[in-house]
Amino acid sequence: MTNPINPRVDSLNRSTTASVGNEKAQAKSNNADNTTGAIASEDTVSLSQESQQVASLQQQLKDSSAIDQVKVDAIKQEIANGNYPLDTQKIAENLINLEQSLIE
């Protein structure tokens, strides 16, 4: 685009843009040369003592089972046999409480 007031400004902008474009191309070329060579430095990460403890506790929780499968199986068997007492009033109250907590 030419500047109708001062055409010299337009020619200055073009030459400046061309030189900036050449500098960018040279920088890209230099970066390409650097990426093909060996990496000069390596990044390292170290965890604090607290984060190591948290990681250890997370692993312990993952390894342990929070469900007593023997007890679950025993209750299932009692229910199947009809020997497990169910308090329908308590079950209904807990369902209502759950629904109310979901609304809030």
Image (cartoon, rainbow, N blue to C red):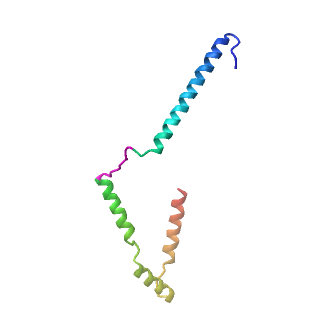
**Residue nearest the observer in this picture, 45 or 93:** 45
Residue 90 vs residue 11: left or right?
Answer: left
**Residue nearest the observer in this picture, 69 or 88:** 69
Q: Is residue 77 above or below residue 12?
A: below
As drawn, the residue found furthest toward the top would be 5
**Residue nearest the observer in this picture, 66 or 6:** 6
Q: Residue at x 53, y 72 (%)?
A: 92
Boundaries of the magenta span: 40-48
Q: Is residue 88 above or below residue 4?
A: below
- Percent x, y of residue 43: 37, 47
Residue 98 is a magenta residue: no
Residue 42 is a magenta residue: yes
Q: Residue at x 52, y 68 (%)?
A: 95
Q: Is residue 58 above or below residue 36?
A: below
- Which is the main secondary structure of the residues drawn in magenta? loop
**Residue nearest the observer in this picture, 104 or 37:** 37
Q: Is residue 92 above or below residue 35?
A: below
Q: Residue at x 40, y 82 (%)?
A: 70
- Percent x, y of residue 96: 53, 66
- Percent x, y of residue 19: 57, 24
- Percent x, y of residue 40: 38, 43
Q: Quadrant of the N terminus?
A: top right
As drawn, the residue found furthest toward the left would be 49
Residue 86 vs residue 3: left or right?
Answer: left
- Dividing the picture into quarters, in which one does residue 22 lie? top right
